[in-house]
Amino acid sequence: MKKLEEYSPTELATIATILGIIIASKFDVDQQNVVANFLFSVAQSIFIIAAQLSNLQAKEEAQNASNVNTVSNSTNRDLQKQIDELKNLMKDFGDNTIL
């Protein structure tokens, strides 16, 4: 049997349709409503879990990006400081060679 992620969208829709027909044929209308509402509730729980996981992953990625930006900004400041120091050294060297 394939893993879930190996099925195409069309295959999943076909399997869902077939299962729906099989389940519906086993029950009367009232039982079909109970089963359908139960499965809908299960699906809602899965949606809530998936949404929260997505939310937490997005926050973690944003935090990681923020940390990278902080390190980058710090590195940029250090490099700018070194450039300024080199400019001053070059200026001092130029001032000393003219005399």
Image: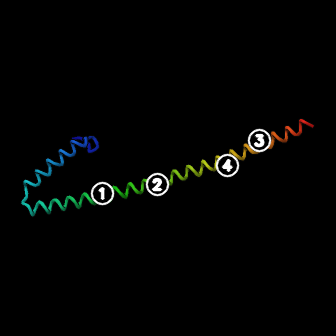
Counting from the top left corner in percent of width and height, residue 74 is at 64, 50
Amino acid tagged 2: Glu
Disc 3 + disc 2, Cβ < 8 Å:
no
Tell me the quarter of the picture where residue 4 sits.
top left
Label 3 vs label 2: CA separation?
A: 39 Å
Counting from the top left corner in percent of width and height, residue 62 is at 49, 53
Report the side of 86 relative to 61 (left or right): right
At 9% from the left edge and 64% from the top edge, which residue is drawn? 30
Per the image, the residue denoted by label 2 is 60
Tell me the quarter of the picture where residue 33 sits.
bottom left
Report the side of 83 relative to 93 (left or right): left
Label 1 vs label 2: CA separation?
A: 20 Å
Per the image, the residue denoted by label 3 is 86
Amino acid tagged 4: Arg
Q: Secondary structure at mark 1?
A: helix
Q: Quadrant of the C terminus?
A: top right
Amino acid tagged 3: Leu
Q: Secondary structure at mark 4?
A: helix
Disc 1 + disc 4, Cβ < 8 Å:
no
Task: Bin the neighbour count of mark 3 within 10 Å (Cα to Cα): few under 14, some 14-19, many 20 and up.
Answer: few
Q: Residue furthest right?
A: 99
Of callouts 3 and 2, the N-terminal one = 2
Per the image, the residue denoted by label 4 is 77
Q: Secondary structure at mark 2?
A: helix
